[in-house]
Amino acid sequence: MNRFPKNILIIQAHPDDAESWSAGTLAIMAEKGWKITIATMTSGGMGGVDTNEAETVALREKEAAAAAAEIGADYYSLRRRDGFLFDDESVRLDTIALMRKVNAGIVITHPPFDYHQDHRTTCVITDAAVMLSSLDNIPCGESPLEITPLFYHGMPMNLTDPLGNPTPEPHFFVDISGSPIEKKIAMLARHKSQKELMRQMHKIDDFFGEMKKFNAELGAMVGVEHAECYWQHLGGGFQRDPLLQEELGMRIRHR
């Protein structure tokens, strides 16, 4: 097997995305000694109630940093505009630079069939950046990675695509029962601003409780109390080592 740095970079569209879809897995990997970096393409500036965009950005960046600190992770925002995220040369270069700065061995992002347009755009940007991250000619001011990172996709809401159809079968599930699900809820709880937003947008009174319920539904699919699920990006040109699966060991489940 190839040797990859023990650094995980999870790149998501908004603050609270990493916590919603992957925090249990990240907590397990942090306990195993992996360095975790949580990055967002935007700072979630449109996701405010009774705060303007600038105030919301400042608040949500503070919440995201506090959530990351729950597992000893770092937080970065690439500070594109929430709801208006586009794939262009500038954001690809910034994403590559971040991958190189943190010496990423594993990169996780949204799936290409996610329900949210910012999530899908984040996936496209990250896909391109992973492929280019080890190439010498990329003008981003950071030294190339020694090896192209392993690339994974986390889960979308309800395991459905933008039209509500079932997603492809996940490659694997992760048992996050016990301490990992509690750490996940602690991380989500740092995003206090989103509780009122979810009430306004979706009439959800208990946002964090709904996420825990979804993890329980995933767990029931594979016979555990709570779970998250993933796809590994195995297309041509990408590394295929099942390193995340091997590191998670007995917590891996399949249907």
Image (cartoon, rainbow, N blue to C red):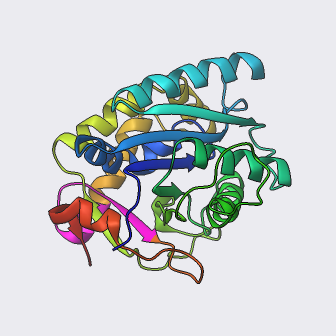
Return the x and y of residue 13 as percentages of the image width and height.
63, 46
Query: Residue shown at 60%/63% (left/top)?
Result: 114
The residue lying furthest to the bottom in this view is: 236
Q: Is residue 52 visible?
A: no
Residue 209: name its quadrant. Answer: top left
111 and 129: which is toward the camera: 129
Is 227 contained in the magenta span? yes
Against 186, residue 103 (above or below) is below
- Relative placement, left or right, of 216 versus 9 is left
Query: Residue shown at 29%/67% (left/top)?
Result: 245
Return the x and y of residue 79 as percentages of the image width and height.
73, 34
Q: Which residues are magenta?
A: 218-231
Q: Is residue 45 visible?
A: yes
Could you tell me which quadrant the C terminus lies in? bottom left
98 and 5: which is toward the camera: 5
Q: How many marks?
A: 0
Against 236, residue 146 (above or below) is above
Against 110, residue 255 (above or below) is below
Return the x and y of residue 242 as percentages of the image width and height.
35, 72
Return the x and y of residue 184 as percentages of the image width and height.
33, 39
Is 62 contained in the magenta span? no
Residue 231: name its quadrant. Answer: bottom left
Query: Residue shown at 80%/51% (left/top)?
Result: 139
- Relative placement, left or right, of 250 versus 195 is left
Could you tell me which quadrant the N terminus lies in? bottom left
196 and 227: which is toward the camera: 227
Residue 43: name its quadrant. Answer: top right
Against 64, residue 98 (above or below) is below
Query: Residue shown at 57%/56% (left/top)?
Result: 145
